[in-house]
Image (tube, grey):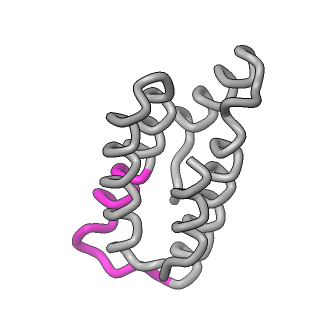
């Protein structure tokens, strides 16, 4: 997850970054089955964002806020293995109940 978080921080904030993040998250989830829920939820979070802006241009304010929120989730997720079971569940629920826009 750390690798994905670092990659995200180095990317442009355009829609292609979010599409690529979603694809990479789902691929990594398939490789790390013990953390599949985490990767899947991050992928779905980004997927909802992409779907809502697929046909509409993104404003700078929207992309800045979405990128900030996604980086924050990715940073939290990078420490997932060190979290207690309760903290993991809390993070998963936070991601599942969030939107980037």
**Which corner quadrant of the image does residue 90 belong to?**
top right
The residue lying toward the viewer, choosing from 33 and 96, is 33
Residue 17, image x, y percentages: 40, 71
**Which corner quadrant of the image does residue 91 belong to?**
top right
In the displayed image of the protein, which residue is found farthest to the left? 55
Position of 69 relative to 30 (above/below):
below
The residue lying toward the viewer, choosing from 33 and 55, is 33
- What residue is at 65 percent from the left and 66 percent from the top? 68
The residue lying toward the viewer, choosing from 55 and 10, is 10
Position of 96 relative to 85 (above/below):
below
Residue 96, image x, y percentages: 51, 33
- What residue is at 53 percent from the left and 84 percent from the top? 60
Say if the magenta span includes residue 57: yes
Say if the magenta span includes residue 43: no
Residue 77, image x, y percentages: 63, 42
The residue lying toward the viewer, choosing from 52 and 30, is 30
- What residue is at 34 percent from the left and 43 percent from the top? 26
Whether residue 23 sits left or right of residue 3 in the image: it is left
**Range of magenta residues:** 46-59
- What residue is at 34 percent from the left and 51 percent from the top? 47
């Amino acid at each position: 997850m750390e690798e994905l978080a670092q990659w995200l921080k180095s990317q442009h904030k355009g829609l292609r970054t979010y599409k690529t993040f979603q694809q990479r998250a789902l691929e990594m989830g398939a490789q790390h089955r013990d953390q599949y829920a985490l990767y899947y939820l991050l992928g779905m979070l980004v997927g909802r964002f992409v779907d809502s802006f697929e046909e509409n241009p993104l404003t700078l304010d929207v992309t800045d806020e979405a990128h900030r929120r996604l980086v924050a989730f990715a940073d939290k997720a990078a420490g997932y293995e060190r979290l207690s079971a309760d903290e993991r569940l809390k993070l998963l629920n936070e991601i599942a109940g969030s939107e980037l826009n």
